[in-house]
Image: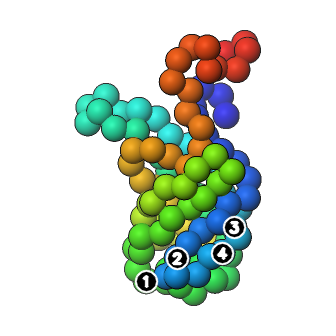
Amino acid sequence: MDDEDGYRGEATLTLDGAELTVTVTLRGNFEPVDGRYHWYGRIQPHAEVTEKAAGRKPTASVRTPFGTAEGVLSDPDTWGRYRISGTSRPPFEVPVSLADLPAGS
């Protein structure tokens, strides 16, 4: 994902007590102004996510093979993909040193 941290693939979204298997594209970056890591992304169209989130901005957790984080869903885009965003530890690996970066970065 270029110079950004992130994850693309299958995840488990826990929303209103239901665990839903979804496909996500997540990214993030450290924000020096507030000293926190901000992560965000899109959930591919999913009928149950649309049903449970319709008209609200619910809190949900997203779990990937690398971790779990709590975020907030916002309005869907034109293609029915809900945005999810959160702060602090993301549900994916983040390099913390130059040694953690992939070769050639």
Q: Earlier in the sequence, mark 4 or mark 1?
A: 4
Q: Decide which of tag 3 and tag 2 comes sooner along the chain.
A: 2
Mark 4 vs mark 2: which is more N-terminal?
2
Q: Which quarter of the rendering shows the N terminus? A: top right
Residue positioned 44% across, 60% down in the render: 71
Disc 3 secondary structure class: strand
Pointer 2: what residue?
Answer: 15
Q: Disc 3 designates what residue? A: 22
> 78 or 49: nearer the eye?
49
Q: How many residues crowd around disc 2 within 10 Å: few (fewer than 14), some, or many (20 or more)? A: some
Q: Quadrant of the C terminus?
A: top right
Q: Amino acid at mark 2?
A: Leu
- Can I make out residue 10 in this image? yes
Tell me, yes or no, whether the two marked residues, 1 and 2, touch with CB atoms within 8 Å: no
Give me the C-alpha separation between circle 4 and circle 1: 19 Å
Q: Badge 4, how many Cα within 10 Å: few under 14, some, many 20+? A: some
Q: Which mark is residue 55?
A: 1
- For the residues labelled 3 and 4, the Cα–Cα distance comes to 6 Å
Q: Earlier in the sequence, mark 1 or mark 3?
A: 3
Crowding at label 3, few (<14), some or many (≥20) Cα neighbours within 10 Å? some
